[in-house]
Each structure stands twice: as C-alpha cells, then as structure tokens.
C-alpha cells in the first residue's frame, strides 16, 4: 500500500524533559520519525519542551516548538499550524497522555487532525489495565489474577482475596511510577496510597505475585495491511520483581525452546491485533513460570518505548523509523531493510551475537533513598554491549557503566563459605550491583542451585558467571600469559584491567604482552540477518574471533567519543554535541566514527555517523577501535571534548598512547581541571576566584575554613555534577563531612572554597580558535550561587545584568580561553558578588548548556566547535555563514525574547525505607535528570512556560503555604503581597505569619508538623489532603526540629506533585509567571520564527 | 570445561579450514555445509530429515541452552551429518530438559565442532555457496590437511543425490484425527516432520503416512480425500518416480498439497525445472508474500533447491493453469504454486514450512486451505 496522500502535515509530539523512565530514547525515536516524515515530503511540526534534544534542532522539523507539552499549549500550536494528523506514539507516555487529553477535550476533532499510528481506542485498550485483561483473555492467554481498585478500602479487601505479597500498579503512569510489592497491609497502605495519588484516574491494579518468574519482552511492528513481525525478544536476567528498566536484560531470549518462544510470539501477535494498534511498534511483556512454563501476559505499550530503542540498537532494525513510515501508509514489504538494502523490512531480525543491557543508577545522589530495586524504575541510564557470547557481552556492558565496582573482580582472597552466604543473603534483595555479589558468592564456592534459589536468576546465566570465575582462575594460576589463554579470557569479555589485576601487573603491561602476541579484537557487523545477506551499514562491535569486517576507506576519519550511559550530570545534552559534530564533520569531508555504548541515544543510531562502534568507553576499548580504524585508512584525530567527562577523562592516556587528540590539548584540559594549575592560570589572567584551599585531613580542612571564613563549599577533587559537594557553616559539620565520607587522603584531597553568599551565578559558553572568541551566550542563574548550575534555572539573555557586567564577563572569559589554550568549546561559571566577578570554574569542553544556548540564539554552536577542533577558524566560520558574521550570543538585540532553562528533578521517584519522598532541597550537588526550555517575550512568561514544561505548572489560584528562614523573611514580603493581590490565600506558620501581618499581609496560621497535637492538623496534613497548591519553604536554621519540619513539608509536597519554591529568587520568578498565566497571554512561536526574528546573522557590523 | 576439549578441525572443499574444539561425538564426518539462522529450535532442526547428509552451521552463538527434551523431536533421530556451533551450553536450563544437547549428539554419534568463528564461516558459504565440508576430531584430527581435504572432496555432492527413501518410513502408518474425523489424507513421506501429521490431525484429518516408494495404487488404497507430499532431503531432479505418482494423483482429480520437496515435485510434475540455490534458505525469519491475499508471512525455511517457474502470469498445463502463489521477498525465489482448473483450486504447494517446528506459525492457515480444498472437491464430486 503506498503512502497516504491525505497527509501533508503531521504534528509530532515529543516526550519532554528527561526523567527517570523516559530518557533520550525518545529523542532517538523522535529524531528518526522527523527525518523520515520530511524525507517523504511531509511538513513536520514538532513540539517538545526539552532543548537538549537533537529532534528539537531547527533542521529536523519545519516548525519546531520548544514549548510545554500541555493540552492548552499544544492546542495553540494545532490552531496555528493546522496539521493533518498527530503522531503521538513516538514521544513516550508524555505524548500519549497529551494526545488522550487533546482527544477528550475535542481538540483533535475540532481541528480535524486524527491520531495516526495508534488510535484512541487502541491506546485505551493497551493502557487501561482492566480493558487490557479482557484483551488478553480474548486472545486465549492469561493475565495475573488481579483486582482494580479506586479506594484504600477496595485495595485492602482485594489483597485479602489475592493473598500477600501483592503487586500494586497505578494506571496511566510511566516507568512504573508508584508501583511496588506489598508484603504486609502496612506496606500496602503506603504503596497503594501513593499509587492512587500518582494515577491521573485514581486507579490502581492489585495483582497476584509472580515474583521470581522469568521475564520476557517482545518488540513488535505492524502495518496497515495487518502484517506483523517480531523485531526482537528480550530476556531479563533479573527475574520478575525488578522493573525491566532496572533489570539487566539480554537479547535475544536465551533460555526458551522454540515451542515456548513461538507461544509468546503467537500471543503477542494476537494481542497487537486485538488491541488494534493500526501501525507501528509496540511491546509486550511476559512472565514465565520456570517450574512449568505457565505464561502470564503482564502489559503492553501501544507505542515506541525504551525497549524499542534497545531492540533497534540490538538488532539494527530501526523501529521508530519504520513505525513512522507505517504511520503514513507504507507496508513493511514496501520499505527496504536499511542494512542490507536488498531485502524488505517485513522480516524478523536474527542475531549472531548476544546483547546485554545494564542499568545505571544514581543512589549516591540520594543517600536517604531505599536502594531496593522494585517495580518502580529508579535507574537514570543504561549501557549496552554486544559480544559473540553472553559472557563477553555481559562483561563489556558492566565495564561500560564506568563505575568503580561495577565489573566482576577477583580481588582479595576468595570469599569463605560464610562470607559467600552473607553475600548471597544480601543478593536476595535486588540492588544496584547485585550481579557482582552473585559473582562473588559463586566465587566463594556456592553452587548454581543455591544462588538460583536465592535470587531467581536462571541457572543458565549463573552457570555462565561461574564460567567467568573459572576462566579467571585459569588466568590467575597459569604460569604465563599465552596467546591461547589471553584469547580464552578475551572471548569471555575480560578487560586488560581485569587481567592485570589477576596477574598482579600493570594494565599497560598486559596490553603490551597481548599486542606483542598478536591478540587483538576483530570487529563484526550488526546486520539484522546473521550474515545471510551482505550488510551495507558499518555498525560494528568487537569480538575475539577470526575475521574482521572493517572495510578500508579513503577519506580521513575523525573518531568522536560519546558520553556513555546517561547519568545525573551527563545526559542527552552531550549526545547532542557529539551528534552535531558528526554531522558537521561529515559535511566538511571527513568520515566520522562514533564510539559509544548508550543504546538510548541518537549518536548510536547507525545513520548518524559514517561508522558506528558500539563499544565501552574505556582506554582499552577505545585504543583498539583507533587501531582498527588506523588499519582501515587515515585517522585525522579523536574528539574528546564533546561527550562530557567520560571522554575527557581518557584524553591524557590516549595521547600517551600516541593517539592524536583534536581540539583543546590534554595538557590544556589539565590546566582547567587541576586545582593548582588553574589557580596559576587565574593569577596570570588577573582574575579573582573565591578564596580556597586543599585539605588532606579534617584538621586541615577546619584550619583552611577558619582562615577563609565560613560558609565554605567542600567537595572531593575531580568530580562532575557536584558529586559529594556540600555547603558547610561550622567546624563541627566540616570535620564530620571530611571524616564521614573518608574522602581525604594522600590521593584524594578535599577542596575547600569560600562560599559566596547572595552571589549571582553566571554561565558562559564560548568558542575559541586560538585567536578569536565567539561568545555563544551568557546565562544568568535565577537561584543564587551554591545551587548546582545543572539544577538551577537560568535566563538568556541575562535579565538583571547590565551592559558593563556583560562586557566584564566577556573580557574575563577571553582571558581564560587564552590562558588555558582552548580550541573549541569552553564553559565558564562566574559568581558576581559585591561587584566582584569571581571565576568559579572553567571547563574546556562542551557543556550541558550548549544545546540551550544554540536554540536560544539560533546558532549551531556544536557544529562550529567540531569544525574549530579540526582546524577551521572562527573568521572562516563567520565567512561560511556557520556563525553570525558580526554579532554573537553575548550581545543579544534589545528586542530579543527571553529563554529560560529549568531543571527537572526526580525526587518523587526516591523514597526512604519508611516510604517518605527524599528531601527535595537543592544544593551544590546536581540531582536533576533533565531540563526544559521556555521562550517568550519576557522573563515572566518564559519562566511560566518553563514551569509548565518542568512540573505541571504553577497554580493560578488557591492556597500558598509560606514558611521561610529568618534571613529570607525580608525578601518575601513583596512577592507574597503580590500573590495576595493575585487572589491567593496565604497559609503560614506563626513566625512567618507574624512578619507578614506586620507588613499588612493576612495569612492564616497553621501548625508546624512538630507542633501538631492529638487531633490537630499540621501543614503536612493539609498538604497531604491536597489543600495546598504551592509551597514556599526555604531551609532554615540549625535546629533539628525545624529541619525535620522543613523536610516533612517538602517530602509531602513532592509526593503530592505540587510546586515547591525553596529560594527567594524562585519566588519572585514564580510570581511573575503566575501573573503571566493568569493573563493567559502565552504565545507559541517556533524556533525557526524565533531565529528569524532574532536574526543574529543579519546584524550589520558596527559602524 | 573449555580446557578439556581437544582440538578439532573443519575443512571446506575449497580448502578453507577452521580450527575449533571437539563437540558431540568424536570422529569424522563429511556432508554439505549449510547455515541455519534460527535462534531457537535446534532440537527440531537436528531431527528434521531434510537435513540428512548436511553439516549444519548455527549462526546463533549459544546452542544447547535448553537441553534436550522428550517432546520436540521432529522424527525418530538426529539427521544432520555434522554440527557446527560457536558456544555450546555447559548446562541446560529448561523445565522440559531431560539431558544435555551434547550428550544427545554423542549418543546418536553426531560429530560436531565448537569454538569456530561461525560468522566467518557463514559469510564464506554466503559468498562461495554451499559446499562439501568435513569435521574431524579425535585421532583423525591429527591427519595432514591435504589428507583431510582429500576426504572432503571425495564425498558425494548434494546435486544429483536421491535421499528421500533413506529417511522416509519403510512401513505405512496412520495418525488418527483429533476429535471427529473429517478427511482422509494419503501423505507420502519423503522425510516428513512429526508436526505435519499432527497439524493435519488437529483439523480432523486421518493421516495415512506412506513410504517414499508408494505407488498410485497404494494411494488409492486408503481412499483419500486428498494427497500430501512432504518435505525431504536431496535433489528434486532425482525424484522422477514421485513426480510420476503426482501426475497420476492430479489426473485422478485428487486434491493435492505439498510442502518443500512436495512443492518441487509439483513443479516438476507440471513441467517446470528445479535448480540449486547458491546457499539456500535456512532459517525461521523469511518473509514470504501470499500473493492471493497480499499479506506477508514470516516463515520457516529449509531448502537448497527451488522451482524455476515464471513469477508473473499463468502457465497452462495439462492439469490446469499454474501460478506462483508465494514468493520470498528477500530474493524473489518461488515459494509456492497453485493449480486451478476452471478457476477452481485443485492443487497447491509451498516451498517453506507451514508446520513450522521450529519457526513461526504464520503459515498454519495453509492446512486450513487444504481442508477447504478437500471440502470443495468433495462437493464438486458429490
């Protein structure tokens, strides 16, 4: 069936900010969809509030709206653009939920733009648990016994019937939010209570426990002619009970016979037909009883998902791309398989390798959180590895996590039986790193049967881990490293580092021996067909096998090192820069070679670069890729500046191994990273920094702090994302910090900086080519300095800084770029306090804000950076029109709209062991997972949009609870007064209320949580009852009770999903935003129109 | 475990050699090297009689994970001549497993090799075509390479091989229908898989499985409502006897359904040629278009030969107008034939495996189509 000709314009809904459960896999799928639709000559209108995505780059759509994904705003876009159809199946749960709301409000009908891909009925059948159970029954399959509940009474009664433990699953939430296992009525009250709250329809499903069963997932694709193919089967190594996003997963399924597999396939196909997903992808999850093979259908997603991104990367079958083609009317047999180019997409990929995905967690950022893995997803990213065997893929995947302790090890003596049993006991509770406990328990001599009994992990997988231990034993006890032994170890995925530790020799020596013996990896190809047909796409992975498939090439290659698994502090924004560099350098005549191990990203799409190596980003793995490419043709160099700290950390070692690094040199990188060296750079440039010192013990830290004065900011050296950073006000806390964390030591000093109170923080992104600087943009933070820049909201152009201050920023930045010797991008953070511009830090690499700046100013910064790294000058790029000829982002036109970036925080995902949400207070340690952007005429409106995108927006009426620290009381009077004028009722604790009343503001007094007596209602009770619409609470004083009170308030607010303002600056911004929303004058404007209006490129040279 | 395996060697007739380790039975074997891309179903593959005299290379890297059970055999024994895998399972894991795959291979005397770069071998076969191969383990592995190559080149080639009678039943037997009996079918066994009569029986067919040497009289003797020719090994050009038999069946006006070898024989009976494919179709992911409905089915394949019939238009024959009903979308190979007389279907066959085992069940409808054909035929006669 050919393309539908009634669709000339499509609105694609994106997935919004990166949150846990919905990450950059939707940037990958959305980017593919936009590309496909445009190739088909369809006008693409895109809405996505996330500026860090590649899909929101102006060249991927005809009209790109970086606007909040709310029904009101999307309706405005529809009214303006009048698309013929809406595609919502590629933007995760956010897009699907928005589409459903548009349907319910009659918007889709009003503007005659129906959903394509999945229709409303199919979405409801797939998403509504009760209806879905009916679907499963009609398909002749089984669901877990269950009950749908809308109240706590129903919940408790149903659990009595089903028997404990029971599973709780809220309806219409994503990433399993709010679901969990309840073993007792108490646990049930807590979990189901939260679940009812999270569900937009106040509905939870209670289910019989299938804990410990084998878990599988099938990815399917259907077209309008009712052809269905299974793209990939995925088996979870962690059995039922751990969310699939938090599980180690394997593709293809490895422990099913054909009969069982075909049964899953038959059910899946019946289900997709019964649900009626017209076209496109969907996934179906199954539990299989390991005792007798009984199959339970768990759920299906009638849309592209995180697993589809994984399945696409695992098989080479681009699900989102094909789904987009199906949505506009093509059938599977009409679309060629990209990889073979000869055979059609109407087939089922077959793999001659094994893929393992491992999740990456961030529990260290939330020390109070319960780290048990449950059916609520908690991981923030994932790494994938491909190997010719399971052991090889698993070990590669574990080292791709780039986390100390994530890999198998054989350090220290073999665990005693007692120690092994203790390990196994801990492994009964699934946590991050359980697999290493399992490996150690096996190493300690426990049997596969015992470990299987305790963990439920399939004996086949355990046996493979035992095999890894066995190989390690061979390596450790052999008289020498023979080629056979090395090859054996390598075939089971051992890294040089692991071998080095087993042989008690340096890693470089192992590598030297290995190379001398000629033991090197070959590179195989992901080709969808197990070599049945020739592959045209160089998508490679390493293996220690006989034959390599890397083709020779003529053009010079540039290797781009990606950023590895997403984590807090290093996410999609770095992928953005890598992808843009690849595009720019391909255009400039290079072959680009991407190396990365994150399956969610656009960078690991085989379409993005000339070649893709799906490999861990360790020194060993990168060196081998460099070697293979040097064998294939000329290599111009390796780009390490764009993927964040991961590749940057490899720069020096790569250079020492003779690898050419392009852009800023490793020595220059050290100048910025090394505290002492950076101090000298600042001194020579005559730039002030906050007073600071380096301490190797608690006593030293206290001494330094007394000298430079409290408060101080303390942190371990060499960190990203503010890991372990704290602001400390006294000696006792300071020594406690240093001792508690046992951070200080000869190799690990602690940095102590004077903390600047009441400073304005400024972020700058620039390009420097050795002679000229291009100022990308200057951002003014809304929160004061001390809150991590990644968690803080900011505005571009700066909203309160004057021209002289901006010129000072420009001047200081230039001196830094010169002093460090930057070639490419640099990010600098300043703090402006008492009219002194302090340099906080400089990072000679692409920063988190590059995509935001690029969109706010309409200039492709990352592309330009890549060109500069390969030798182009800024003058040349201005000449070519890549950069504005005369203007830059530091001098925005007076009429320029304001862009606001706001962070999105994951607090409500993390609960303490008691079930409370962890504290949502912002600090110097970064904890946001993503960001949104709001653009509008002025700051108030832009900030309002950022809040609509980040949280569900600010209230326009109702009750605001205000309770602030003494030092903030003076500053809140005006904003709170304004809130009263805007019609809000103010609720306050006695202290704050007293101050407000003296200033003529009436506030109702409410009890603090600690003051609550028998029968009284505290503010926390009111918040829990939904009677508070917004909370203003700044952390106060040293007293333990006030602190506990503040925490209880914030936890309740986060749990209720209500906005919480924790700084005075945020409050002022919030008031402006509320006014803007009340006036209802938020306009929508596409980035293309924004850039045209701004017209930096058209600005003439100053006379 | 790994270190205790002794070396083994795989030698292709063009001289390319792979070294690996002994797997399954120790000794030597020679056959036609073919690769199979299925990721599941090795037990069904190994016991599929169509693999007689073939050395099967598994592209899936892990083989044996689910062990060997008592239910999934497609015939009474393992037929492959040799087995090439990359990474054999050490311990099986499945609630149905009764023993390990390797024990079963050893028990049935199947010589295998593991730790081979199976992808390199597959690519070689893809580029050079299916060819003879030898696997040598145990004492014989120590022989010189020229000697081993000589043994491989001395073995008979698949082209021209008549093998069906070697694998088929010697005695006729009956598979009773499940539930009420609706039809009687004479199924000529050329290497039939157990699942074929099972799927017929599920549709109320009493299946009389006849030896490959069955005559028209033998067929008539069971008073069938329809006749079926199964899959099987060897070169269809050698199956003149069966082609004759089929012509007799068609002249007698008996509805016909054929699978695989049965498709090639229908082709030959209708006057088309057959030819050897470069490296064949062996896997469970092959897209086939049913041209009568325009839908695509994902199907199980195992064939090295194909029918040479025109893809477009009908060919008039003594038995009716013949059209190509199914085509493989990967390479346009003929995957099914249909014979119509006065617009009415009288015979049809497919080159692939609607009985699956292993493989997807998308083409199971063909058994229903056979039932429909027999029903209409009964009505016409009545």
Image (cartoon, coloured by chain):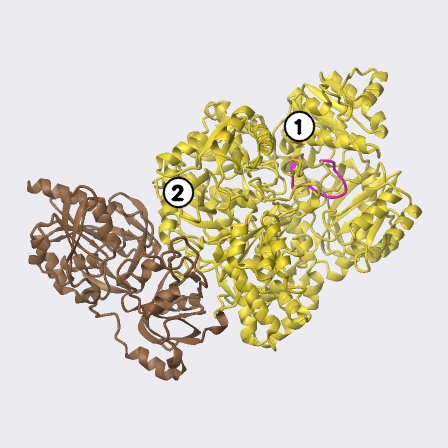
Chain colours: A yellow, B brown
The residue that appears at 70% across and 22% down in the rendered structure is A1075
Mark count: 2
Mark 1–mark 2 CB contact (< 8 Å): no
Q: Secondary structure at mark 2?
A: helix
Q: Is residue A499 left or right of residue A90?
A: right
The residue that appears at 46% across and 29% down in the rendered structure is A113
Q: Categorize mark 2 by other alpha carbons within 10 Å: few (<14), some (14-19), many (20+).
A: many
Q: Is residue B278 left or right of residue A946?
A: left
Quadrant in which residue B218 is drawn = bottom left
Question: Looking at the picture, how far across and down is residue A373, in whole percent?
Answer: 59, 44
Where A950 sits versus A606, above or below? above
Where A264 sits versus A164, above or below? below
Q: Secondary structure at mark 1?
A: loop
Q: Alpha-carbon distance for marks 1 and 2?
A: 39 Å
Instruction: Identify the chain of the residue marked 1, using the numbered disc in the image.
Output: A
User: Which residue was labeled with disc 1?
Assistant: A1058
Mark identifier at residue A268: 2
Quarter of the image where the C terminus of chain B is located: top left
Where B147 sits versus A1068, above or below? below
The residue that appears at 38% across and 66% down in the rendered structure is B103
Q: Is residue A464 left or right of residue B190?
A: right
Question: Looking at the picture, how far across and down is residue A334, in whole percent?
Answer: 36, 47
* A925 in the magenta segment: yes
| Residue extent of the magenta highlight | A920-933
Instruction: Identify the chain of the residue marked 2, using the numbered disc in the image.
Output: A
Quadrant in which residue A931 is drawn = top right
Front residue (pair A814, A379): A379
Front residue (pair A736, A852): A736
């Amino acid at each position: 069936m050919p393309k539908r000709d009634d669709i000339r314009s499509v609105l694609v809904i994106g997935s919004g900010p990166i949150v846990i459960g919905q990450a950059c896999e939707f940037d990958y799928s959305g980017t593919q969809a936009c590309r496909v639709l445009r190739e088909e000559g369809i006008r693409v209108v895109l809405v996505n509030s996330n500026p860090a995505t590649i899909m929101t780059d102006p060249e991927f759509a005809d009209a790109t709206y970086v606007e909040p994904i709310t029904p009101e705003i999307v309706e405005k876009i529809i009214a303006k653009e009048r698309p013929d159809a809406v595609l919502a199946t590629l933007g995760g749960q956010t897009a699907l939920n928005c589409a459903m709301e548009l349907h319910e409000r009659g918007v889709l009908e009003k503007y005659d733009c129906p959903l394509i891909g999945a229709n409303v009925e199919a979405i409801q059948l797939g998403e509504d648990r009760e209806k879905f159970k009916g679907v499963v029954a009609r398909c002749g399959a089984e669901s877990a016994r269950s009950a749908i509940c809308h109240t706590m009474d129903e919940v408790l009664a149903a659990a009595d019937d089903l028997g404990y433990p029971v599973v709780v699953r809220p309806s219409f939430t994503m990433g399993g939010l709010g679901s969990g296992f309840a073993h007792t009525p108490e646990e049930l009250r807590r979990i189901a209570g939260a679940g009812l709250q999270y569900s937009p329809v106040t509905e939870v499903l209670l289910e019989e426990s299938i804990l410990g069963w084998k878990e599988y997932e099938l990815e399917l694709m259907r077209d309008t002619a009712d052809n269905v193919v299974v793209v990939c089967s995925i088996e979870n190594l962690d059995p039922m009970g751990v969310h699939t996003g938090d599980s180690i997963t394997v593709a293809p399924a490895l422990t099913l016979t054909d009969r069982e597999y075909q049964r899953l396939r038959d059910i899946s196909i019946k289900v997709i037909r019964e649900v009626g997903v017209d076209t496109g992808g969907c996934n179906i999850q199954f539990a299989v009883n390991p005792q007798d093979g009984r199959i339970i259908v768990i759920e299906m997603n009638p849309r592209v998902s995180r697993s589809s991104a994984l399945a696409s990367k695992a098989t080479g079958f681009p699900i989102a791309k094909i789904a987009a083609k199906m949505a506009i009317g093509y059938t599977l047999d009409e679309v060629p398989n990209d990889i073979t180019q000869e055979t059609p997409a109407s087939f089922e990929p077959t793999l001659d390798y094994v893929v393992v995905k491992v999740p990456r967690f961030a529990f260290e950022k939330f020390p109070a959180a319960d780290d048990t893995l449950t059916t609520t997803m908690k991981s923030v990213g994932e790494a994938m590895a491909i190997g010719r065997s399971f052991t090889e893929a698993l070990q590669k995947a574990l080292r791709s996590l780039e986390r100390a302790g994530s890999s198998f090890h054989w350090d220290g003596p073999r665990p005693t039986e007692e120690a092994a049993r203790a390990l196994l006991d801990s492994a009964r509770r699934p946590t991050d790193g359980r697999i290493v406990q399992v490996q150690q328990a096996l190493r300690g001599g426990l049997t596969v049967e015992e470990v299987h009994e305790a963990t439920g992990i399939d004996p086949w997988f355990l046996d493979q881990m035992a095999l890894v231990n066995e190989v390690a034993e061979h390596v450790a006890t052999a008289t020498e490293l023979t080629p056979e032994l090395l090859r054996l170890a390598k075939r089971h995925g051992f890294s040089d580092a692991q071998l080095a530790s087993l042989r008690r020799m340096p890693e470089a020596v192992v590598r030297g021996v290995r190379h001398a013996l000629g033991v090197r990896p070959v590179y195989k190809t992901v080709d969808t067909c197990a070599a049945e047909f020739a592959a045209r796409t160089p998508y490679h992975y390493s293996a220690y096998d006989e034959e390599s498939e890397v083709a020779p090439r003529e053009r010079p290659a540039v290797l781009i090192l990606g950023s590895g698994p997403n984590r807090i502090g290093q996410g999609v924004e770095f992928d953005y820069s890598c992808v843009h560099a690849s595009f720019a350098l391909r255009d400039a005549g290079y072959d680009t070679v991407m190396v990365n191990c994150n399956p969610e990203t656009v960078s690991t799409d085989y379409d993005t670069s000339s070649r893709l190596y799906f490999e861990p980003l360790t020194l060993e793995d990168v060196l081998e890729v460099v070697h293979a490419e040097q064998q294939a043709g000329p290599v111009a160099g390796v780009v390490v500046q764009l993927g964040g700290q991961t590749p940057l950390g490899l720069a020096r070692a790569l250079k020492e191994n003779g690898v050419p690094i392009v852009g800023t040199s490793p020595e220059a990188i050290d100048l910025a990273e090394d505290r002492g060296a950076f101090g000298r750079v600042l001194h020579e440039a005559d730039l002030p920094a906050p007073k600071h010192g380096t301490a190797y013990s608690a006593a030293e830290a206290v001494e330094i702090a007394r000298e430079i004065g409290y408060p101080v900011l303390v942190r371990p050296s060499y960190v990203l994302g503010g890991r372990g950073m704290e602001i400390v006000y006294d000696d006792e806390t300071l020594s406690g910090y240093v001792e508690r964390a046992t951070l200080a030591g000869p190799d690990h000093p602690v940095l102590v900086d004077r903390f600047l109170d009441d400073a304005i923080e400024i972020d700058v992104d620039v390009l420097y080519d050795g002679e000229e600087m291009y100022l990308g943009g200057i951002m003014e933070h809304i929160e004061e300095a001390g809150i991590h820049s990644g968690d803080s909201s900011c505005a571009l152009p700066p909203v309160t800084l004057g021209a002289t201050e901006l010129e000072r920023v420009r001047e200081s930045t230039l001196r830094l770029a010169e002093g460090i010797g930057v070639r490419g991008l640099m990010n600098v953070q300043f703090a402006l306090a008492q009219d002194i511009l302090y340099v906080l830090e400089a990072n000679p690499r692409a920063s988190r804000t590059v995509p935001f700046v690029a969109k706010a100013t309409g200039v492709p910064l990352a592309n330009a950076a890549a060109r500069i790294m390969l030798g182009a000058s800024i003058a040349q790029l201005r000449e070519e029109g890549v950069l504005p000829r005369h203007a830059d982002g530091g001098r925005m036109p007076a009429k320029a709209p304001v862009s606001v970036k706001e962070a999105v925080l994951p607090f409500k995902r993390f609960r303490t062991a008691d079930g409370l949400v962890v504290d949502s207070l912002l600090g110097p340690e970064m904890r946001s997972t993503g960001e949104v952007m709001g653009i509008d005429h002025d700051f108030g409106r832009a900030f309002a949009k950022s809040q609509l995108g980040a949280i569900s927006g600010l209230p326009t009426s109702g009750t605001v609870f205000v309770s602030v620290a003494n030092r903030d009381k003076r500053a809140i009077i005006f904003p709170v007064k304004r809130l009263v004028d805007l019609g809000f009722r103010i609720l306050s604790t006695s202290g704050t209320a007293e101050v407000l009343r003296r200033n003529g503001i009436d506030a109702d007094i409410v009890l603090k949580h600690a003051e609550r007596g028998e029968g009284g209602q505290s503010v926390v009770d009111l918040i829990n009852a939904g009677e508070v619409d917004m909370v203003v609470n700044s952390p106060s004083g040293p007293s333990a009770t006030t602190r506990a009170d503040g925490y209880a308030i914030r936890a309740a607010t986060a749990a209720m999903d209500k906005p919480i303002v924790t700084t005075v600056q945020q409050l002022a911004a919030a008031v402006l935003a509320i006014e803007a929303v009340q006036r209802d004058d938020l306009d929508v404007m596409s980035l293309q129109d924004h850039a045209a209006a701004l017209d930096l490129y058209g600005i003439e040279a100053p006379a | 475990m790994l270190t205790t395996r002794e070396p083994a060697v795989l030698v292709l007739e063009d001289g390319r050699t792979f070294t690996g380790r002994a797997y399954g039975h120790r000794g030597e074997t020679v056959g036609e090297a073919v690769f199979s891309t299925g990721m599941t179903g090795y037990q069904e593959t190994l016991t599929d009689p169509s693999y007689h005299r073939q050395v099967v290379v598994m592209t899936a890297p892990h083989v044996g994970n689910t062990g060997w059970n008592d239910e999934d055999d497609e015939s009474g024994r393992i037929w492959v001549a040799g087995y090439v895998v990359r990474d054999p399972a050490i311990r099986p894991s499945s609630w149905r497993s009764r023993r390990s795959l390797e024990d079963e291979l050893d028990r049935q005397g199947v010589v295998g090799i593991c730790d081979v770069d199976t992808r390199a071998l597959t690519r070689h076969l893809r580029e050079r075509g299916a060819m003879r191969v030898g696997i040598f383990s145990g004492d014989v592995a120590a022989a010189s390479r020229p000697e081993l190559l000589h043994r491989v080149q001395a073995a008979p080639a698949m082209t021209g091989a008549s093998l069906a009678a070697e694998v088929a039943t010697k005695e006729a037997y009956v598979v009773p229908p499940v539930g009420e009996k609706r039809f009687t079918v004479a199924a000529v066994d050329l290497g039939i898989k157990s699942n074929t009569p099972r799927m017929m029986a599920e549709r109320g067919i009493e299946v009389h499985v006849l030896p490959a040497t069955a005559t028209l009289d033998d067929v008539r003797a069971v008073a069938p409502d329809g006749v079926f020719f199964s899959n099987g090994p060897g070169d269809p050009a050698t199956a003149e006897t069966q082609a004759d038999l089929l012509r007799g069946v068609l002249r007698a006006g008996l509805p016909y359904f054929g699978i695989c070898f049965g498709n090639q024989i229908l082709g030959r009976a209708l006057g088309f040629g057959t030819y050897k494919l470069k490296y064949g179709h062996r896997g469970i992911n092959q897209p086939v278009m049913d041209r009568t409905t325009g839908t695509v089915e994902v199907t199980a394949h195992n064939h090295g030969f194909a029918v040479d019939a025109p893809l477009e238009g009908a060919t008039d024959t003594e038995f009716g107008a013949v059209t190509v009903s199914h085509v493989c979308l990967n390479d346009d190979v003929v995957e099914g034939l249909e014979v119509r007389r006065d617009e009415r279907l009288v015979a049809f066959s497919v080159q692939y495996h609607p009985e699956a085992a292993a493989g997807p069940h998308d083409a199971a409808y063909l058994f229903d189509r056979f039932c429909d054909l027999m029903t209409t035929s009964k009505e016409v006669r009545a």
